[in-house]
Amino acid sequence: MRAVVFEDVGRPGIQDRTVPAVGADEVLVQVVATGICGTDRAILLGEFPARRGVVLGHEAVGAVTAVGAGVRSVAPGDRVVINPTYHCDRCRPCRRGMPAHCGAKAGREIGVDRDGTMAEFAVAPERFVHRLPAAVPYRRGTLVEPLACVLNNLRAARLRWDDRVLVLGAGPIGALCALVLARRGARVTLAERDQGRLALARLLLPRAVQVLAAEEVTGAGRADAVIDTTGTLPGDVLGAVAPGGTVVVMGEKEAGVATLPLRALVTGGIRLVGAGPYRPADFELAVDLARDLPLEGLVTHVLPLERYAEALAMLAVTPAGPGRSDGAAGYSAMKVLLATDDGLAP
Ligand SMILES: [Zn+2]
Ligand SMILES: [Zn+2]
């Protein structure tokens, strides 16, 4: 089978791999499409550590083609989405009800240190394979995983119904935050530095979302909650937070460092929180909410696997090697999917 592989920093490649074997409690999925994520991008830019030679990708939908002898919940032919955030259920964090912080993740992160889904087939343990509801087409299903991230981070913000929310970064994660919040009737502002992404956000999001260039934010009034999806937490962020407000930090760049004025944090009574990875229940909720959320509106491009380099270039990853990812990077897409030959027939 063909697979898109992380050969080295700045060097993705397409390789021929054997179709993975299926263990007793595992499911073999013929991948229909995988969304390209900020994490894939960060791996290729050298900003997120990953194993060289790993098959990239973790936001996948597809059809079950084979199951192990012990599998009961899915069968060949089922349309499914894979939860790529594995946990062991045995370590101390897992037993204390914090599977998102599982201590046994090393070697188990799909598309990072274990082969991912930018391939024609992928294998996953049964308990991380979810059937897609009939109302969720494949194209929409690819956004279930990012939606789980978003739900987890919005929960960490402990929002009140009358909160004003500022989302920093209009990539797919920021746009999904805004989409979910707008659906809930929240007053939401989305801020972005990259001109391409700014234009796409204005085009793709409902009118209820206020979309601003990052430099316009200061005049927009203070927010009760700020969700930073940029991974760079700007030093002046506290100026945008109302007293008693919350800042949720997303983004997992290894070298991400922020400098904040502590007095503003203390006198403002501001809560600064990292939500961590999503829990299994967030993923199940995302599968369910996807029935009613038109997530596929954020998909701007669908390309076959072979055109991975073109797809990455739209997301400001060029073969030249590590580049800027701190804004003004030159995006020309919102969500890009890599699809297998069968494309995205529902
Ligand atoms: Zn992702
Ligand atoms: Zn664990």
Image (spheres, helix red, strand yellow):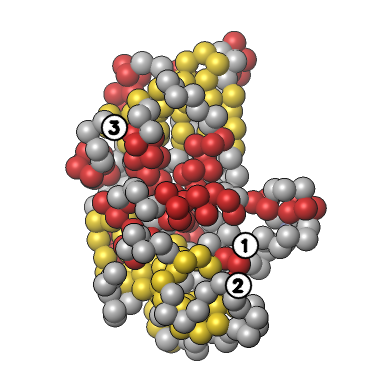
Query: Which mark identifies residue 86?
Result: 1
Residue receiving disc 2: 125
Within 10 Å of the Cα at label 1, are there few (<14), some (14-19), or many (20+) other Cα atoms? many
When asked about the image quadrant of residue 109, the answer is bottom right
**Tag 3: amino acid:** Val
Residue 46, percent across and down? 50, 58
Return the disc, 1 or 3, that comes first in the chain's sequence. Answer: 1
Image point (34%, 40%), residue name: 179
When asked about the image quadrant of residue 327, the answer is top left
Give the distance between the C-alpha atoms of the residues marked 2 and 1, in whole angstroms.
9 Å
Left or right: residue 157 versus residue 99 is left
Please tell me whether residue 259 is drawn above or below residue 255 in the rendered image.
Answer: above
Give the distance between the C-alpha atoms of the residues marked 2 and 3, in whole angstroms.
38 Å
Residue 280, percent across and down? 59, 54
Left or right: residue 31 versus residue 71 is left
Residue receiving disc 3: 209
Please tell me whether residue 274 is drawn above or below residue 133 in the rendered image.
Answer: above
Secondary-structure class at tag 1: loop
**Tag 1: amino acid:** Tyr
Secondary-structure class at tag 2: strand
Secondary-structure class at tag 3: strand
Residue 316, percent across and down? 32, 55
